[in-house]
Image (spheres, grey):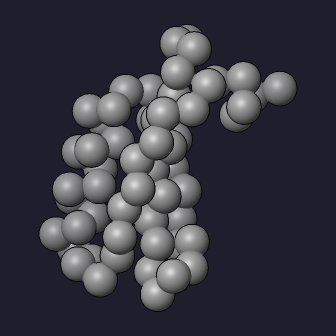
Amino acid sequence: MTETMWRCDQVRAGQLYNRMMFDTREEAERFARKMQQMEPDQVFAIEAIEAKQVWN
């Protein structure tokens, strides 16, 4: 496991709709692109976070 994970937040109408975690930025961006095509009313934010913030 890497020390950095990538969080992808899906926001709709100002509310957090879904949060997904990915091992690489490329995976997160690929997911966001696919979802944007299917649901264009959502906003996506991709952020790097330390794995220790996710796993105890």
Query: Residue 38 or 14: which is nearer the viewer?
Result: 14
| Residue at far left of view | 37
Is 9 rendered above or below residue 17?
Answer: above
Q: Residue at x 48, y 33 (%)?
A: 48
Is 50 rendered above or below residue 42?
Answer: above
Q: Is residue 2 left or right of residue 56?
A: left
Q: In this view, does 11 lie to the left or right of 34?
A: right
Residue 41 screen position, x and y as percent: 29, 83
Q: Which residue is drawn at 46% across and 42% down?
A: 47
Q: Is residue 38 left or right of residue 7?
A: left
| Residue at far bottom of view | 13
Q: Which residue is drawn at 23% across and 78% down?
A: 40
Q: Which residue is drawn at 72% across and 31% down?
A: 53
Is 43 rendered above or below residue 34?
Answer: below
Residue 14 screen position, x and y as percent: 51, 82
Query: Residue 39 or 6: which is nearer the viewer?
Result: 6
